[in-house]
Image: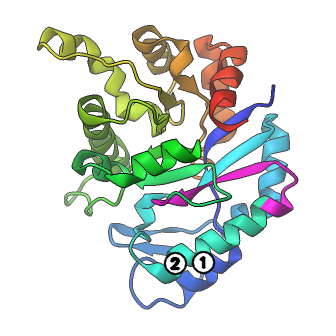
Amino acid sequence: MASFDVHQHLWPEQLVAALRKRSRPPRIDGDELILGEGTFDAGLDAHTLDARLSLLDEVGIDTAVVSLQPTLACDGIPELVDAYHNGILELVAAAGGRLQAFAVAECLEGFAGACIPAPTVVGGIGELADELAAAGQTLFVHPGPVPPPPAGAPAWWSALVDYPAQMQAAYAAWLTHGHAELPIVFAFLAGGAPFQLERLRARGGDVPQMAVFFDTASYGPLALRLTGEACGQGCLVFGSDAPVMDANAALAAVEEAGVSEAALRTNAGQLFA
């Protein structure tokens, strides 16, 4: 069975060109990605098809499922969303089966599912859930934009405080009013939300039977083992968050945690094979 990395990001040339044309965030100026929360190295060399296929070969992954991260705040800007959709389908077609893609908050033909920002789940996703379930697609939940960190905060503030808070809220909302027939993947262990299940039960809450999966990105062996114990290894799928994070480090964490490679392949295969 093929191996999958369900959490990678890839920007097609059409999207990069559209971001360069903008005069306000989100935009790209030279080698810098300018967002409402700050300015970052765009790292454009990692967003070519050749570079991505080379990365997959390096880490021994057959297929990457790529998305446009909602943290860029491209949702609601039609020229950026269209540029991504058109460009990423071209890359998927050219990749010889090595790539699949999530659409931006829509159920579209040719895509593996839809990627949405975590706060959207809290408010409810309406008809999108029914559309994805009927199409046999998957919902991928990723953090959305966050405000600039407090004055004097370290560089890791948003990644450690804001993003996990969004993901935990999204997971709690899904347990409350999620779609029972729609498979869903929460990025980076839903910010540690499975660790809260004991407290949920202690407060009288229930954990309904739903097809909920957690990708392994950004966490180490301890967190992966805790999630496996809380929800079973059948809930884990491999995700690296490449090129934002190091895919080799993500693989090393999975191996050190003792997560079964066969389980990861089987779990992701249910969704994307």
The answer to whether residue 74 is magenta is no
Residue count near mark 1 (Cα–Cα under 10 Å), binned few <14, some 14–19, many ≥20:
some
Determine the image quadrant of residue 223: top left
Q: Disc number at residue 80? A: 2
Q: Position of residue 205 (x, y in %)?
A: 17, 17
Magenta segment range? 93-106
- Mark 1 and 2 residues: CB-CB less than 8 Å, in contact? yes
The outermost residue toward the right is 96
Task: Give the structural element (helix, strand or loop) at label 2.
Answer: helix
Residue type (three-letter) at the residue carrying disc 2: Leu
The outermost residue toward the front is 134
Q: Is residue 189 left or right of residue 265?
A: left
Residue at the image point whose x is 62% and y is 14% from the top: 259
Q: How many marks?
A: 2
Determine the image quadrant of residue 95: bottom right
According to the image, label 1 marks what residue?
A: 83
The answer to whether residue 100 is magenta is yes
Please, is residue 168 above or below residue 154 in the view? above
Residue count near mark 2 (Cα–Cα under 10 Å), binned few <14, some 14–19, many ≥20:
many
Which quadrant does the C terminus fall into?
top right
Q: Position of residue 41 (x, y in %)?
A: 55, 67
Please, is residue 108 above or below residue 241 in the view? below
Residue at the image point whose x is 59% and y is 28% from the top: 237
